[in-house]
C-alpha cells in the first residue's frame, strides 16, 4: 500500500489523516460482486462501517444495496444513488421520525426487532396510507465466537426477537394490515473468521423458515446478515477476505426454495483494508521499563483498540529500508530530520507502547509493539482502519476532525 512515492507525498501533508487506497477498495468490491453473483445472492453494504462519500460512491457503482441503521443513513443511501428497492433499515431503536423518513423513501424493507416495533411501523404506515415491507430479525442463539462486544445473535443480546416470541410475532403480523411480511433476517456478530459458525447459522435459518411456512407465512427473503472478518495481522498478504468460501457455505447449507432471494449485509469485509490512519511521532519517551511513542493521532481518530481491545498492525513508514533516504518533516513544527543520518540504526528494534495525545490513560493503540528504533517526526501507519475508523471519530478534547486523502 505504501511505496516510496506515497511516503514522499505523505511528508508534505499535515497529520494525522485517513489514507484511502481506492485500488484496494475496487479490488475488494470486485471480488465480492463476482463471488455473490455466482449464486444470484443480493449484497447490501452496511453503511455504519464507513460512510465516507467517495467510498459510498464507489460501492454504489458496483450495484450493491444499502443496509442502514439510522434515518440519516437512509438519507445518505438515497443521496448516493443506492436504489430504494435495495435499501433496508435495521436497528433496535428506530424513532418515529426515522421510520417516517424511511416510509417516505419507499425503502425495500424494515428489519424489525420487536413485536412493539411491528405495531408502531404499522400505525405510522397506516397514517400515510402506505404498506411497509418487513422482515423479522430473529436471534438464532448461534455463538459467533467473536468479541463479546460485537456478538449480536445470542438470546441475551439486545438485538432481534427470540424464538420463543415468534407466536406473538405471527399474531401481530396477522393483525397489522399495513405490513407486508417479506422474510426473516439474522445477524450474529462481526469480525467472524470461523466459517463453521455460518454452517450453524444456516441450520437455524432452515429450521426457522420452515416454522414460518408451517404457520402459513411465505418466506420470500432469507437475509443472513454479514459479519465476515478481515485479517488485521497481515493486511497486505490478505487484503481481500475469502468471499468465495463465505458465499459457498450458504450455497451449500442453506435450503433456498423456488422464488426465494438470499440477502447479505456486509460492511467491514468490504472497506476495512482500504484505509489506514497515518500519524507522526510527536515524542519518544524512554523509561526504565517502558518506551513510549506519543503520536498526534489517538482514540479520537481510531477508538477500536481502546473500545474493543482490537488489534491493528502498526508500521513505522519512515524506518522502512526503502524510505530511509527520505526526509521527515514534522507538520507545523518547521523542524526536519535527515533519516540518512540514522541509517545505521535501521536494524535496531525496540518495544514501544504506541499511545495518543488524549487526556485518558486508555488512549493506547497497542502495548509492547516491536518497531525499528523510532524518532520524533517519523510517520506511523495504523493499518486496516477503513471500517469503524473515520465513522467513529469524535471531537473529544476539542480535537479537530482530520482530513482524508486518497490514492490517485
Image (tube, helix red, strand yellow):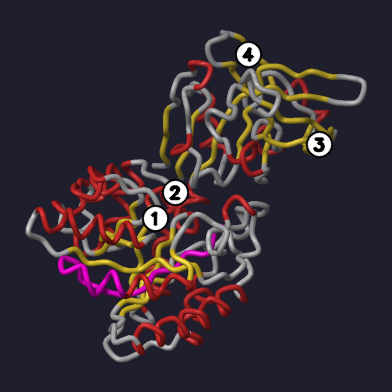
Q: Nearer the N terminus, badge 3 or badge 4?
A: 4
Work out how far the residue at label 1 is from the one at label 3, CA to CA, in angstroms.
34 Å
Foreground mark, 2 or 3, reads 2
Q: Mark 2 = which residue?
A: 49
Q: Nearer the N terminus, badge 1 or badge 3?
A: 1
Callout 4: SS: strand
Q: Mark 1 = which residue?
A: 46
Q: Which one is nearer the viewer's eye here, 312 or 100? A: 100
Q: Mark 1–mark 2 contact, CB under 8 Å?
A: yes
Magenta span includes 175: yes
Q: Which one is nearer the viewer's eye here, 264 or 275? A: 264
Is residue 327 in sight in this rendering?
no
Work out how far the residue at label 3 is from the one at label 4, CA to CA, in angstroms.
27 Å
Q: Which one is nearer the viewer's eye here, 38 or 7? A: 38
Q: Mark 4 = which residue?
A: 336
Q: Mark 3 = which residue?
A: 368
Residue displayed at 47% across by 28% down? 394
Residue 107 falls left or right of residue 226: left
Callout 2: SS: helix
Depicted 350 relative to depicted 130: above or below: above
Amino acid at each position: 500500500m505504501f511505496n516510496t512515492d506515497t511516503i514522499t507525498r505523505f511528508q508534505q501533508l499535515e497529520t494525522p489523516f485517513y489514507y484511502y487506497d481506492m485500488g484496494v477498495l475496487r479490488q475488494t468490491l470486485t471480488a465480492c460482486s463476482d463471488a455473490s453473483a455466482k449464486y444470484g445472492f443480493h449484497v447490501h453494504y452496511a453503511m455504519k462501517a464507513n460512510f465516507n462519500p467517495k467510498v459510498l460512491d464507489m460501492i454504489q457503482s458496483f450495484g450493491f444495496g444499502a443496509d442502514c441503521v439510522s434515518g440519516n443513513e437512509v438519507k445518505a443511501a438515497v443521496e448516493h444513488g443506492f436504489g430504494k428497492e435495495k435499501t433496508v433499515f435495521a436497528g433496535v431503536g428506530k424513532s418515529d421520525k426515522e421510520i417516517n423518513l424511511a416510509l417516505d423513501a419507499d425503502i425495500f424493507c424494515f428489519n424489525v426487532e420487536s413485536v412493539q416495533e411491528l405495531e408502531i411501523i404499522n400505525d405510522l404506515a397506516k397514517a400515510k396510507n402506505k404498506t411497509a415491507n418487513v422482515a423479522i430479525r430473529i436471534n438464532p442463539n448461534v455463538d459467533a465466537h467473536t468479541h463479546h462486544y460485537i456478538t449480536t445473535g445470542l438470546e441475551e443480546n439486545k438485538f432481534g426477537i427470540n424464538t420463543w416470541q415468534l407466536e406473538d410475532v405471527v399474531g401481530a403480523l396477522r393483525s397489522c394490515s399495513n405490513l407486508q411480511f417479506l422474510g426473516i433476517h439474522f445477524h450474529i456478530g462481526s469480525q467472524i473468521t470461523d466459517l463453521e459458525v455460518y454452517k450453524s447459522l444456516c441450520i437455524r435459518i432452515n429450521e426457522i423458515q420452515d416454522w414460518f411456512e408451517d404457520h402459513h407465512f411465505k418466506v420470500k427473503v432469507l437475509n443472513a446478515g454479514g459479519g465476515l472478518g478481515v485479517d488485521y495481522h497481515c493486511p497486505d498478504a490478505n487484503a481481500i477476505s475469502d468471499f468465495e468460501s463465505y458465499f459457498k457455505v450458504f450455497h451449500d447449507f442453506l435450503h433456498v426454495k423456488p422464488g426465494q432471494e438470499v440477502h447479505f449485509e456486509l460492511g467491514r469485509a468490504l472497506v476495512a483494508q482500504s484505509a489506514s490512519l497515518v500519524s507522526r511521532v510527536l515524542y519518544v519517551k524512554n523509561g526504565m521499563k517502558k518506551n513510549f511513542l506519543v503520536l498526534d493521532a489517538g482514540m479520537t481518530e481510531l477508538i477500536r483498540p481502546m473500545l474493543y481491545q482490537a488489534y491493528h498492525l502498526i508500521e513505522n513508514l519512515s524506518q522502512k529500508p526503502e524510505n530511509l533516504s527520505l526526509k521527515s518533516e514534522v507538520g507545523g513544527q518547521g523542524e526536519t530530520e535527515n533519516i540518512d543520518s540514522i541509517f545505521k540504526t535501521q536494524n535496531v528494534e525496540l518495544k514501544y507502547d504506541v499511545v495518543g495525545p488524549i487526556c485518558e490513560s486508555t488512549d493506547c493503540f497497542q502495548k509492547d509493539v516491536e518497531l525499528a528504533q523510532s524518532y520524533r517526526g517519523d510517520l506511523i501507519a495504523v493499518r486496516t482502519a477503513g471500517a469503524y475508523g473515520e465513522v467513529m471519530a469524535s471531537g473529544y478534547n476539542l480535537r479537530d476532525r482530520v482530513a482524508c486523502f486518497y490514492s490517485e
